Image: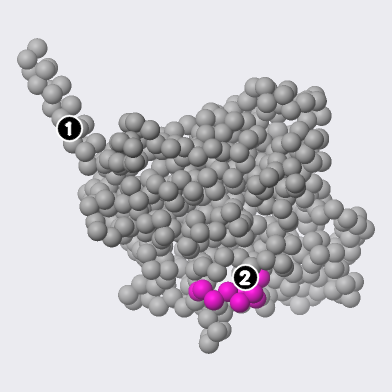
Amino acid sequence: MRLLIVNCLFISFKITIIFANCVSNFPENSTGFGVLSSTFNNITYCQYLGVRYARAQRFQRPILHQPKDREDYTKLGSVCPQMNDFNYPTAVIGDEDCLFLNVYTPETSKKRKQLLPVLVFIHGGSFTIGSSTFDVGGVDLLMENEIIVITMNYRLDVLGFLRYTKFNITGNYGLKDQQAALRWINRYIKFFGGDSNRVTLMGQSAGASAVNYHLYSDQSSGLFQQAAILSGSFLSSWAFAYRSDYFAEVYLKHLRITSREQLVDLNIENLILVNGTHKIVGTRWIPAAEGNDDPYPFLTSPPQELILRKRAMDIPLLVGVTLTEYELLRIASTVKLNLDKINVPSGFNESIWNIIDNFTEITINSLKEAGTINKTEDFIRKVANDFSMNFPIEHVVNAITSKGHSSPIYAYRFDYDGKFGRYKNEHFKPGIASQRYGAVHGDDLSYIFTPYKVDDALKNRDNYRNEWFVYEKMSEMIANFVKFGNPSLEDFDWKPYNAESVQKQFARIDHHLEMKPNSLMDSTYFHFCKRLYDCIYNFNCSSMDQA
């Protein structure tokens, strides 16, 4: 009995020590208690998990949370409601009370005289799935590079992006949640040892398109000072809903919903699962333009209009893609472009599809005759990938630089095809149609955050030499961008993409690092995508008629 009491006292003392090392003291005697952890190199850092940043009622704006009394930051908060599987959903997971973030800080952050720079990460997942831990295997090397890292939940799917004016549902709640998180960080990060004037906003895939939106949002201005856009663009067809009211009407009719009250009272399973994998043809729960129905709209114009009439924040930018993105995956159609023919701008003329089909056929035949491609499938896969990913990213960068962006823009292409690449080796493995070398969509994240194979890699370092090299370099370059606004290393001078004195160039990241001239703009596929884009979104098909 006496031994048991001693053991209990020891455990209690140990927990107290852990809390004492990871405590945030807010105004008005409020305190948040985190957990002491350590990297795989035994460097200690603090995890503040499940930090509430806001509350929100269904289909309403988030209300910022003010820390009160003693707040427990020792376990993750609930994920936002979503399908348990993107492709084959059978249930809904998560809770609507989900507006939490996680803060990871070097243990000494609050003891320093100088506040640390902050990296805020917005996860991807097609605005449909994901959470604050999505694609974040850990933050080990980022902690050792002495920056603060923050990840967040935001509302997804119908709850995050349904817009229906008749029910006064303004939409973009997921983006408004992200903005609320940025406001919370701006107000409270100093109590974790972070500098609110040195915040870098980084997103990947759908998260990258969200960062795009924040770059053009007046309400987000001043909440971050740098941005990193990885494999995503708000100009992609999957990133903006042109017919949000139509999508809502199709969805509500299927549910037999006739009032806002019915929709608000509907159980979460019926609300989300009924739309799993687009069972209701044509629905899209993604960002949309708001109108006068919201006194504080986040977005009032399609992104294609924004880039023409407005300047993005003039701040340092880091833009990245992977070598193959989705190009190696099996695609639905191998004989023709399988474009989204529902989510198009209002006023779109259906006859345009005939022009596009004819132009596509002429281009393919021309490339075959020239020996550039062997099969139609090669062209379709390349264009489908470029039109969805590479062209929209390049187009955004060109639009930003054309308006006199004075801050540096750094670009990279992540080529390395290694064992840490979780998407190619695990997530996308069943759908890989080609074994060609090259990282796929999402693989670069495994070299920024802690890789999923880190345990085996620590035991067998010799088998992962190149992986360790790329991981260490990549995480250091990201950290350097966060700290200095420049991702260069001591032994690698990373030139800005928009430098006036040199040709546009990007950093090629493989088992070695090098600067490469940008050749994407001169490619046949890029020019095809540009004509396709102008025809669909600007109604300018003259270049196709002349083909």
**Residue lying farthest to the right in this orientation:** 351
Type of amino acid at the residue the image marks with label 2: Ile
| Residue extending furthest toward the top | 1
Residue 53 % position (x, y): 46, 40
Q: Quadrant of residue 384?
A: bottom right
Kindly identify which residue carries mark 2: 400
Q: Residue at x 44, y 51 (%)?
A: 186
The residue carrying mark 1 is 14
**For the residue labelled by badge 1, is the local secondary structure a helix, a strand or a loop?**
helix
From the viewer's perspective, is residue 184 above or below residue 14?
below
Seen at 80% across and 35% down, the residue is: 166
Is residue 114 found left or right of 446 in the rendered image?
left
Q: Bounds of the magenta span?
A: 399-408
Label 1 crowd (10 A; few <14 / some 14-19 / many >=20): few
Does the magenta segment cover residue 382?
no
Asked which secondary structure carries label 2, the reply is: helix
User: At label 1, which amino acid type do we have?
Assistant: Lys
